[in-house]
Amino acid sequence: MEFGPHLMLALLEGAVTSAVLALTAMGLSLVFGVMRVVNVAHGAFFMLGAVAAWWIAQLVGAHPALGFAAALLAAPLLVGAGAMLADRLILARVGYDPERTIVATIGLMYVIEQTVLMGFGPDARPVAPPFDARIALPWVERTAEGLALYWPWGLSITAYKLFVIAAAAAILAGLWALMTRTGAGLVMRATQQDRDMARAFGVPVSRVFARVFGLGAALAAMGAVLVVPIQQAHYLMGGDPLLLSFIVVIIGGLGSLPGTVVAALLIGMTDGIVSVFLSPTLAKIVATLAVALVLVFRPQGLMGRARA
Amino acid sequence: MIDARRSLLLHGGIVACLALLAATLPAYHAGNLTRILVLAVYAMGYNLLFGYTGLLSLGHALFFAAGMYGFGLSAALGGLSAGAALLAGVAAAALVAGLTGALALRTRDVAFMIVTLMFAQAGYLTILYLGTWTRGDEGFVLPAAARRLAGFDLRGDGARLVAALTLFSACFLATAALTGSRLGRTLIAIRENEERARMLGYDTARLKLVAVVLSGTLSGLAGAAYAMLFGYVGASFATVQYSILPLLWVLLGGAGTTVGPLVGVALMFYLIDWSSRVTDAYMLVAGAALIGLTLFAPQGVAGLIRRKAAPWLP
Amino acid sequence: MAAVTLLETRGLSKSFGGVTACDGIDLALPAGETLALIGPNGSGKSTFTAMIAGRIRPDRGRVLLRGRDVTALPAHARIAMGMAYTFQITSVFADLPVRENVALALRRTVRGEGRVQLRTEQTLGRVGLLARADQPAGDLSYGHQRVLEIAMGLAQNPALFILDEPTQGLSEPEVAEFVALMDDLPAATAVLLVEHNMDVVMRLAGRIAVLDAGGLIAVGPPDRIRADPAVQAAYLGTADA
Amino acid sequence: MTQPPRPAPTRRRALATFGAAGAAVLLGDVARMAHSQGAGPLKLGFQVHRTGIGAAYGRWYERVATAAVARINDAGGIAGRQVRMIAEDDGTDPRRGAEVLDRFANLHGADLVFGPLFSNVVIGSAPRAAELKMPYFVVSEGHHVASGTLNRYTLQPGITDVKSQVRSVAPYVAANIGRKVTMIFPDFAFGHDHREFFTDAIAAQGGEVIAQIPVPPAETSFTRYFPRIPRETEVLYHVMVGPAVLTFVREMGEFFGGRGPALFGFIDSLEAVDIASPGLEFLEGSHLWEGMPRFAQPDQTGHDARYRAAVGVDDTGASIDDPRDVSTYAHMFGVWETLSVIKAGMETAGYRGPSDRPALIEAVEAMTDMPLSDDHPQGDKLFNGRTHQVFGRQSVSRVEGGRLIRVHETSVEDTLYEDEVDYTTRPF
């Protein structure tokens, strides 16, 4: 494929990756920002969302769109509820100690993965997209008669992928409104600023923590529900989203909503764009090192401010 | 001073007990002991950085793999003898630790975790990218010459166990000596309060790099030894799984204790060994055990003993 | 002046996000002198001492130690040249025994663990913490932790001892003990003391330097400072409000 | 990190219980190690990918192994002795794989070990098999056995290796599909084998590989790699493994939108995947390599029918119990045939116990022709004792109406290549 269309396609694909990543990473960022703990089980919650989506779509049967809609509503609720339970049963009891939380959530990740393996099995299972039209895109080329439009091989996107981008943007906008315009958001932000002060002002910090943890997991699940019609539900699918979300959260600056979105775009796009220029595996190596070096030389993240 | 004598007695006693076990255990458990001892060296390397210096790395698989591939490639492709290849593996690990450590130490806390993780990920992908020589994920079998050290054929179970025990004991006693030394105590000071240590005149930036290099070198030694003793080099040892394992071992056994790594590896090994007899979901049992551990014994087994019975435990 | 100039700052300046914390401070401290640094809250005292110790990098100006420009040197290197530093907010190794806290201060310069332990016990004896040598430092009372931190400074036998508000939060008898410890310092030790308690300042300081809004408004012996109208206006009037 | 104190005795008791349990486990192991020399059932260790990335294959391998062992036992066992299969999960991990061999040898007292598919597990475990002097029958289709990198104790008598597969179908591709080939494959050893063997084989047919596109492992989205396919490509040769194969194929369809080059793929890209899944309609008319045809063909043999019935698979290659549960039909026959070879080898060698293991290996090495039969339902085969590798017919199938119809079958001769090793000269 020529350079132009290739880059265009990489950007489109990168936008879809970024959209899902932004949702997933936002969940991690929220937990990280408010609770100051590293949730290693975040990828497992993502996977749970995908598996729940498959299960709900199976139950509903009927038209794919109906099953998908049901999954988009119910899967995040289920996963969020599960996460709140985990918060009450485990994290609250270790007092949100950073190191113990890491170990406990690693344990939780194993437990979730193996439980899903036993119940759901080792196969990758698809969920039918609600709609699936392919939209071919034109490109310009210079011909004898001047510039002309043509339709290169493969320069296309599906209607569903466009929907994923729009849905992610809508959910993020909703989250933004929740955090800035509502009482619940105010309470979360206050807890993020200074949990002792918040407690002194009568904020029920432990209940806020449970809700934030649930909301974080639900965001991961939403990302997963959006992605299963493109990819499939598989019990080991949580690894990549976990790693990428971590990177996004750090690059974006801890707990910063706009920073997380910008970083998700950056990471999602980098992968695609670098792969235009380099052989695929080399591209991955270069992209990984590039992000690592950004962290090394701007440890406060791209959007964060240096602390005195 | 009494503590020092106690410490000598404890570490000497453990080595003696292990030797006794090695001589008496039935074949299956002797084989497990061999593996546990080598993996415990890896855990001790990790503990040096995490348990004693307070730096949580999620990228130690890079150092383990650097040792393993440094050994394996120089023996299989370079035709080096096992002894020379072992040195090459250790040197490779030290070099990689020095380079990545110098960069990663510009960050701290979670950013340090992520940067080390990403360096390790880049290392793993590099192994796959250089598949012509490394055979990627499939890996390669080491030639017989690479498994003969100082006249011993390490393909034999007896020689292998003796080699593993020797390696472990040397590293175990060395780390015990290190933790009691000026350097070791200074690293602990950095773990406890880095700014205070710096304002006592310690060059904490340099000392942390020293800790990364020591830790990486020991991890690389373990990687090289694992390849030499078990005859296989493969990319699965460079995956993120192998960065998380030493963290779990050390936490399970007791971070910042000399015996913790051994205890943690042995417990985890037998937890999986035992539960896999009962169920396929042995990782579920391991996961539940980790959760239980954080709830009920957060300082790990050795940490628990130190707190309850023996506060002098190094 | 017979004494050698131990520490000198020239035009030392620092601002944080447009707010000037220190503005062109010139100050000299000869060996053996105790200089108290006073000024209202936010006048730049801690920033100034942190720049001397190397914890904060100045925007402009230089720090000279024994005539040598140390502005580019990191903190640990300056400490190694004979500084000791105590934090405004007590900073000890809370999970380590009291004994080990002091030993760590000694071990950088004293060779041999036997000698380190001996000197540790001497130092702890001098500050009255020997009985608590094996407790974790974090279990000590607040006052004792301050004393421990001072002991860590004493153990280093510094040529320049920087104390950032050492008596903050101490009880009357503890303050008296602190003053006695300072009296006991070797004659050659220079002390830079950031202090709010004017009794302590008057009792210990050979000279007083007054900072206000990041600028040095007066330097001199206690009597002169007490009488200085500018100082009275800026500071003394509000000192113990 | 201060902890609220908890009653110590509970902990102490827990530790004591733990210690006692440990001792019991140790003693139990020693007692169980009594060997089965000449009496009792034969113990066959089955190294299986129950968890990890190979679990989708492992599940079907286990179904086939269970069925094959049941068939052997129903027919009177091996030399009159019943067979007990002991399965151990290797987690699709080479370290665990080698540890599992220790368990078979020193804990279960197994007579031999069979079954692994993933080549990293095979290569990681093989050195240990040789050290334990444990016959190790792999079902991996990797070239690692015949290439000579492994050892005398490791054999692959049930499935043809990738070198044979790739070389034998190249003439059909060149003659019937196209000569300018672009290859897309996973960027690790298995994919590299495809790359090397096919590039040579197509050149020998007057064709040419014009681009090679390696895809990083564990990749979950693929569209960004397809633009590297040159426009003059006549045939796109695709092979992919892992849980994301369906995504791979679907995105390939979306990319071309019905206008792309002809497709020739290895069924690995669609193994355990329903060919009628939504989004795969574009595969209609494309060609796939199959180790054994997933759909019952019009000229189906009775052997295939009986094999299908025994392993519980219907005429479309899906589970009889659940038509959505598609098998790994193109590979799993290898487990069945491996067990047939083990039975024949043990009976020929007069196997009585572990001391007869070398005799068993020599007996298998002496095998040559394996005719089409219920023991070898995939087809007739030729075993090469020197390279420890079997050679059999390969199929090329075309997707027609959502079914895979065989359009070409290679001969056994088509799969042969020069020996790269002679394991029989190596000592036991």
Image: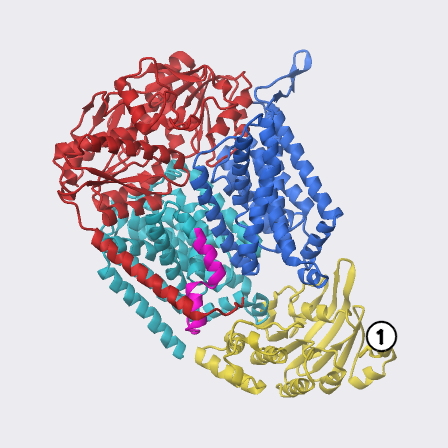
Q: Position of residue B152 (x, y in %)?
A: 22, 54
Q: Which chain is red?
A: D
Circle 1 is placed at which residue position? C234
Is the N terminus of chain B in the top left, top right, bottom left or bottom right quadrant?
Answer: bottom left
Quarter where residue B254 is shown = bottom left
In the rendered image, is residue A7 in sight? no
Give D266 or D29, whichever is nearer the viewer.
Answer: D29
Task: Give the residue at x 55% y 40%.
Answer: A49
Is the C terminus of chain B in the top left, top right, bottom left or bottom right quadrant?
Answer: bottom left
Q: Which colour represents chain B?
A: cyan
Task: Give the residue at x 63% y 45%.
Answer: A26
Tell me the magenta residue range. Answer: B287-314
Is A227 placed left or right of A188 in the picture? left
In the rendered image, is residue D163 in sight? yes
On screen, A197 above or below D143? below
Task: Give the residue at x 48% y 32%.
Answer: A125
SS label for mark 1: helix
On screen, B298 above or below D396? below
Give D32 or A17, whichever is nearer the viewer.
Answer: D32
Q: Position of residue B207 (x, y in %)?
A: 51, 63
- The image shows a total of numbered marks equal to 1
Chain of the residue under the numbered disc 1 shown in the image: C
Amino acid type at image mark 1:
Ala
Q: Which chain is blue?
A: A
The structure's colour scheme is: by chain
Query: Chief secondary structure of the magenta span?
Result: helix
Q: Which chain is yellow?
A: C
In magenta segment, residue B124: no
